[in-house]
Amino acid sequence: MLTVRMNDRAVSLLGAIGHGAAVPGGEPTPALRARLAGGLVVRDGAVVLAETARRSVGPAEAARGDLTGWECGVNSFHLEDYVDVPVGRLDEGGPVVEVSAQRELLLQGLGLAREVCALGRNAVPPIPLRCIVSAGPSNAVFRFHRVRAGERWHHPDLDAYREEHLVVVEWGPLAEP
């Protein structure tokens, strides 16, 4: 089962989605696709991108019982590093992302979530995955983890994220409402 959940901010930003797309979003940029080129690797019960595993990510047992949190840490990256959108600078030096760029980053993250879920679906055996895409005034982040019963990295009330546009895309038999 594929599920897509959005907070109200994300629904407002994306506008009407129409009935034709199960998961909105465009084709990920070549740079984002390159992150997925090697597929998924299961290491110590944790799921990571093969590209991440090649960079000598530490052992998952360091997670001390929180594989979901560990996966979200190692499977997390800023979308603006891979998508050509303008990122300004505040006087204090921090980044600022305009709303139109946040929308583009959210759409790119959704396209990437579709691809990551397909990797999980096509794995042998299949791996249920949850992708979390957020876009806000300073950045946009993509992260994912294996779906585990009773575990999630994000707050269950997506509208609790008041500053971010948040979308959760999940594939697998353990999909939670």
Image (spheres, rainbow, N blue to C red):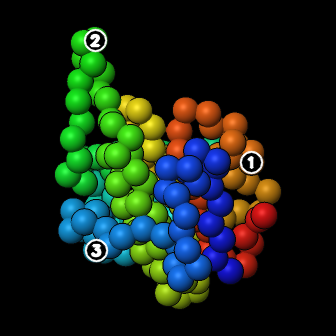
Residue located beneath label 1 in the image: 156
Would residue 117 be visible to someone looking at this image?
Answer: no
**Type of amino acid at the residue the image marks with label 2:** Glu
Please tell me which residue is depicted at 34% across the width and 46% down the height of the picture. 100
User: What is the quadrant of the C terminus in the image?
Assistant: bottom right
**Type of amino acid at the residue the image marks with label 3:** Ala
Q: Residue 37 bears which disc, if any? A: 3
Q: Marks 1 and 3, how far apart in space?
A: 31 Å
Asked if disc 1 and disc 3 are in contact, CB closer than 8 Å, the reply is no
Q: Nearer the viewer, mark 2 or mark 3?
A: 2
Residue neighbourhood size for the residue with mark 1, other residues' Cα within 10 Å, grouped as few (<14), some (14–19), many (≥20): few
Secondary structure under badge 1? loop
Secondary structure under badge 3? loop
Asked if disc 2 and disc 3 are in contact, CB closer than 8 Å, the reply is no
Q: Position of residue 80 (x, y in %)?
A: 29, 46
Please state if 70 lies on the left or on the right of 39 as rendered.
right
Please state if 110 lies on the left or on the right of 81 as rendered.
right
Furthest residue in direction top, as rendered: 92
In the depicted view, which residue is nearer to us: 29 or 37? Answer: 29
Looking at the picture, does residue 43 appear above or below residue 92?
A: below
Please tell me which residue is depicted at 36% across the width and 52% down the height of the picture. 105
Please state if 135 lies on the left or on the right of 87 as rendered.
right
Please tell me which residue is depicted at 53% across the width and 45% down the height of the picture. 165
Q: Marks 2 and 3, how far apart in space?
A: 37 Å
Q: Nearer the viewer, mark 2 or mark 1?
A: 2
Q: Position of residue 60 (x, y in %)?
A: 52, 52
Residue located beneath label 2 in the image: 92
**Type of amino acid at the residue the image marks with label 1:** Pro
Looking at the picture, does residue 50 appear above or below residue 71?
A: below
Asked if disc 2 and disc 1 are in contact, CB closer than 8 Å, the reply is no
